[in-house]
Image (spheres, helix red, strand yellow):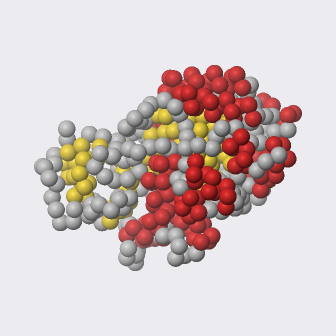
Amino acid sequence: MTRLWIKNPLAIYTGTEQDAAGGIVVSGSHIVELVGRGQQPSAPCDQVFDAGEHVVLPGLINCHHHFYQTLTRAWPGALNKELFPWLKSLYGVWAHLDPEMHGQATRLALTELLLSGCTTAADHHYLFPNGMEEAIDVQVEQARASGVRVMLTRGSMSLGEKDGGLPPQSTVQSEEQILEDSERLINRYHERGDGARVQIALAPCSPFSVTTGIMRESAALAGRLDVRLHTHLAETLDEETFCQQRFGMRTVDYLDSVGWLNGRTWLAHGIHFNDDEIARLGRAGVGICHCPSSNMMLASGICRNLELEAAGAPVGLGVDGSASNDGSNMISEVRQGMYLQRLRYGASKVTHFDAYRWATAGSAQVLGRDDIGVLEAGRQADLALFRLDELRFSGSHDPLAALLLCGAQQADRVMVGGAWKVVDGTLPDVDLEQLLAGHRAAAQRLAAKAMV
């Protein structure tokens, strides 16, 4: 196979202690060699890419998103609200989603992520109104077209307004519908092992939108079919109050009661845990996805990343929905994650290396992947390369620090599984004008339906 030497980068973060100052050799879909400073590859290379003006990172991994929400960014009725009223103002809009809109939203989100250096993304889709029964199938098609690796979580809502939940009845499904479709999707699409491109997980939306029954049955199905579990948990104090009033227990106790307190599970947000709960989550190996921009926008709080990691809980990073962020920019999210955690712990306790770890190896561990997230021989060749030639970087000295501190927004080159997907800051196979036109039209159609 062809050997490509990505030679002598300006700076490189491998996520390991190995010296790779001389670059990386890629063959097929894998990294086959790290080249030390001043050294040459151990065997001749067919191609050489001079990375002397690039900062090289492992492909960034986004472990929580809602692709469909790109259609409702800066929605007037949802501005300046906390989570519960924010959701109530948007559920009625999202209930009008159709497959064509969903496809446009998914493709735009994946494109935006890819341009920001993201090579793997987890999406949490839980809206299945009439006509949207094959929403995950739509996402699989768009993911395959984009080239981004995805963990598509088959979400669900089964607790509507009439039964004390938040979602409108038109967006909820029966337990039978949810479980049948979950098993269908796993059997049809879930890939296993090294290099998997499409994976499926089960993801009841949240304690305030699903029944206890669907939580238990989803855990049982995930165990039987060996897939992961995902949900929102402990995002706000309102959620804590809801759990105590409805179930008579706090969120982690509830998680334990429905069979979710194990290493198969990862949680979005995970803000409002006490010390004992953090210890329990760590012992169980439950992963946490920190969503800094969303948590700031909705004023939900700050995740306790350092205590969670110290307890043994993997910590990753996610952009969350593009209606609570309101973007899908992963390199920007790494910067936000670093700054928000500094606000909690102090500037000397959280470094840019911590932020890079959360967005790469940490997120990979959260998603149960050991083939991505670091740069070393035998791993998938998922890379993000950034140039420091914009005005924002002028006068900077430490390239790896500057990438975050000076606010990088877009990758120059991105590789997924050994194939370049972004070249010179563009996607060679994507007509961005056409993509934007289609997405804007879909957003306008959704808005028009919601206003009727």
Q: How many marks?
A: 0
Q: Name the residue: 70% across, 53% down.
A: 235
Spot occupied by residue 263 in the image (x, y as percentages of width and height): 55, 44
Locate residue 417: give its quadrant.
top left
In the figure, is residue 348 to the left or right of 400?
right
State whether residue 182 is above or below residue 408.
above
Nearer to me, 32 or 283: 283
Spot occupied by residue 385 in the image (x, y as percentages of width and height): 36, 56
In the figure, is residue 277 to the left or right of 85?
left
In the figure, is residue 35 to the left or right of 189?
left
Spot occupied by residue 146 in the image (x, y as percentages of width and height): 44, 38
Q: Name the residue: 23% across, 51% down.
A: 33
- The answer to whether residue 422 is seen in the rendering is no
Locate residue 182: give its quadrant.
top right
Q: Name the residue: 46% across, 48% down.
A: 364
State whether residue 117 is above or below residue 151.
below
Spot occupied by residue 340 in the image (x, y as percentages of width and height): 60, 66
Q: Classify the position of the N terminus by image quarter.
A: top left
Q: Classify the position of the C terminus by image quarter.
A: top right
State whether residue 116 is above or below residue 192.
below
Nearer to me, 380 or 131: 380
In the figure, is residue 209 to the left or right of 50?
right
Which residue sits furthest left?
Answer: 44
- The answer to whether residue 400 is seen in the rendering is yes
Q: Name the residue: 76% across, 50% down.
A: 250
